[in-house]
Amino acid sequence: MTKPIYILNGPNLNLLGTRQTHIYGAATLADLDKRTAERAGKAGFSTVFRQSNREGELVDWIQEAREAASAVIVNAAAYSHTSVAILDALLAVDLPVVEVHLSNIHRRETFRHHSYVSAAADGVIVGLGAQGYELAVDAAVALVQSRATKAS
Ligand code: DQA
């Protein structure tokens, strides 16, 4: 059976749809869950969609993904800019990793321009709002399929 794509969301993303909507858009986390599940489903994949405000919990889920997932999509939110622990966890994952941010972090405050997560990501999608999550699913599916082709 095909393993699910893990979609992991960091701190404050539980507030999507009510938090700084001029930056992050009107879509809620539940909307993103639904949209990504539908997108993955069309390609024959299921999703595991989670959010945590705790760094260690995100690290635990990334470690879980090593065995349980076919790919990881991660929006580590503010931890993207601070967390070596999340970077190290992702570096230990031998799976496609796609980083996503709703906002264009490069057009915002300087402290958001650097993401530790990017050093472990196959690709990064920024600034495209909720659509970026769907594109991240497309990218993850393509990366999983291309690895499977190379391995066969
Ligand atoms: C974010 C960008 C981060 O800088 C910020 O801390 C977030 C959300 C985004 O999706 O645009 O919480 O990751």
Image (cartoon, helix red, strand yellow):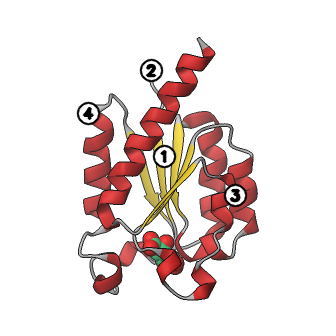
**122 or 1, which is in the foreground?**
122
Q: CA distance from mark 1 to mark 2?
A: 15 Å
The quadrant in which the C terminus is found is top right
Q: CA distance from mark 2 to mark 4?
A: 16 Å
Q: CA distance from mark 3 to mark 1?
A: 19 Å
Q: Return the x and y of residue 133 as percentages of the image width and height.
A: 37, 56
Q: Amino acid at mark 1?
A: Tyr
Q: Which residue is mark 2?
A: 1
Q: Which residue is mark 3?
A: 119
The single residue placed furthest to the top in the displayed view is 152
Q: CA distance from mark 2 to mark 3?
A: 30 Å
Mark 4 and mark 3 lie on one chain; the one further toward the N terminus is 4
Instruction: Classify mark 2: helix, strand or loop.
Output: loop
Instruction: Classify mark 1: helix, strand or loop.
Output: strand
Q: Which residue is mark 1?
A: 6
Q: Return the x and y of residue 58 as percentages of the image width and height.
A: 60, 61
Pointer 4 with pointer 1, Cβ within 8 A: no
